[in-house]
Image: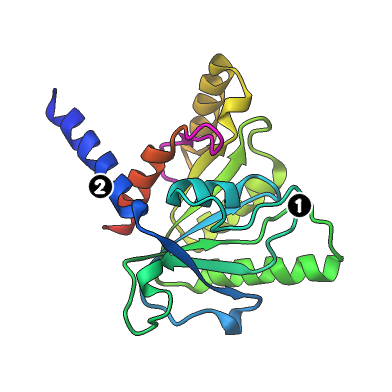
Amino acid sequence: MTSEERARDAALERGRVFFARPWAFLLGAPSAKFLPSEGPTEIAFAGRSNVGKSSLINALTAQKALARTSNTPGRTQELNFFVPQEHAGEPDDLPPLAIVDMPGYGFAKAPKSQVDAWTKLVFDYLRGRSTLKRVYVLIDARHGLKNNDIEVLDLLDKAAVSYQIVLTKSDKIKPPALEKLLVATELAISKRAAAYPQVIATSSEKSQGISELRAAILAAAGI
């Protein structure tokens, strides 16, 4: 085994152990004034409505119902914060990491005024959160990058917020098509200032790419 392979295996095992602890819902922020005080390192998940953010968070933490899942686009209406369970009731005892599930963008079955309010909340959070280390932008592997996604990437570049593309539902397309999509997506973001160059393909249903994503999160968070 090479040193690179040993380092990779060690990173995967560190990610497994870290996320194996119980996680708990901390709070939901419907507007910027309800955001918790900045403290622990945060990573956030963004994506179009119904892209699979909640399912991916559940897969990461190996908990079936940590984040609520729904077939109805726009179900997540707040910035939902999740932390290791031992820290959920102790605000003065800072957790090593907080996971933030952001409201989906794009289509949502809600009044335009409400969608606009969610959008403002997300953008305010992205622009002003110093403890946010990386945003994971989720893209449905069946559809690839869409106009709504490009607009969010433009915003992240402008705000200089580090982000990484994560393909979801990658088990729904054939392996040759997935490989082609990975290459095309990495090429599409290659000249974007804030984009991390590697794209991770995942499937919450099949647990594909989850170990790699855990390791990537810990590396981004400096844990």
Reading the chain from its start, which is encountered first: label 2 or label 1?
2
Furthest-top residue in this view:
176
Identify the residue at horizontal 34%, vertical 85% (top origin). Answer: 92
What whole-number distance in Å separates the C-alpha atoms at marks 2 and 1? Answer: 34 Å
Q: Residue 141: percent from the left, percent from the top?
A: 61, 32
Query: Is 116 situated left or right of 164 in this image?
Result: right
Query: Is 127 situated left or right of 162 in this image?
Result: right
Three-letter amino acid code at the position of disc 2: Arg
* Rendered-image quadrant of the C terminus: bottom left
Q: Can residue 169 be seen in this view?
A: yes
Identify the residue at horizontal 68%, vertical 61% (top origin). Answer: 76
Q: In this view, does 184 lie above or below 95?
A: above
Identify the residue at horizontal 43%, vertical 62% (top origin). Answer: 23
Q: Is residue 124 above or below residue 12?
A: below
Three-letter amino acid code at the position of disc 1: Pro
Furthest-right residue in this view:
111
Q: Which mark is residue 73?
A: 1
Q: Residue 222: percent from the left, percent from the top?
A: 27, 58
Identify the residue at horizontal 49%, vertical 80% (top origin). Answer: 36
The stretch of residues the image draws in magenta is 194-207
Q: Can residue 194 be seen in this view?
A: no
Q: Is residue 126 above or below residue 201?
A: below
What element does badge 1 sit on?
loop
Residue annotated with mark 2? 14
* Rendered-image quadrant of the N terminus: top left
Is most of the magenta stretch helix, strand or loop?
A: loop
Q: How crowded is mark 2: few (under 14 residues within 10 Å), some or many (20 or more)?
A: some
